[in-house]
Image: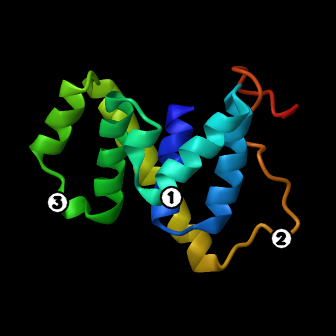
Amino acid sequence: WLLETVGLYVSVLNDCTYCVAHHFAGLSRLLPEKNRSEEIRQALETGLLEKAFAPRERAILQYARQLTQSPRDVQQKSIQEMREAGLDDGEILEVNQVASYFAYVNRTVLGLGVTTEGDTLGLSPGDSAEPDNWQHR
């Protein structure tokens, strides 16, 4: 759910309504508490991260925001803040890769004018840990 939240946040920051719609639906499927996904979405859309996230999660999301909005400003301090929040280098790399991937996809979707018209929302991520299971039940 946390990596899906990173992607959702990047999409919110980039105003990619297509990706927000799809990944909010996916996030909602991942969370057992119905109100939790709404709480997360509201915090991401308002920028009031402290209302929905623990310090470790906020450090991840703050880095994703900086990487999305001002990547030239990312410095060693940004990485150190995530380490101090409890992330190891592998987790930091994963956050970087997810945020960067979503920024790329947002630009692709926005640049092609893709809409959600006729789409079925919430098919990603899949419904199990099996990589070949795309049943989405």
Give the spatial CA distance, label 1 vs label 3: 22 Å
Q: Is residue 103 visible?
A: no
Q: Amino acid at mark 3?
A: Asp
45 or 25, which is in the foreground?
45
At a point 67% along the width and 29% down the height, the residue shown is 31
For label 2, the residue is: 117
Q: Considering only order in the chain, which callout, 2 or 3, is on the residue closer to the N terminus?
A: 3
Q: Position of residue 43 (x, y in %)?
A: 49, 49
Mark 2 Cα-neighbour bin, 10 Å: few <14, some 14–19, many ≥20:
few
> CB under 8 Å between callouts 1 and 3?
no
- Quarter the C terminus occupies: top right
Q: Considering only order in the chain, which callout, 3 or 1, is on the residue closer to the N terminus?
A: 1
Mark 1 Cα-neighbour bin, 10 Å: few <14, some 14–19, many ≥20:
some
Q: Amino acid at mark 1?
A: Glu
Give the spatial CA distance, label 2 vs label 1: 22 Å
37 or 80, which is in the foreground?
37
For label 3, the residue is: 73
Q: Is residue 72 left or right of residue 119?
A: left
Which is closer to the viewer, label 1 or label 3?
Answer: 1
Q: Is residue 22 visible?
A: yes
Q: Regarding mark 1 in the picture, which secondary structure is present there? A: helix
Q: Regarding mark 3 in the picture, which secondary structure is present there? A: helix
- Numbered label attached to residue 45: 1
Give the spatial CA distance, label 3 vs label 2: 37 Å
Q: Is residue 136 left or right of residue 7?
A: right
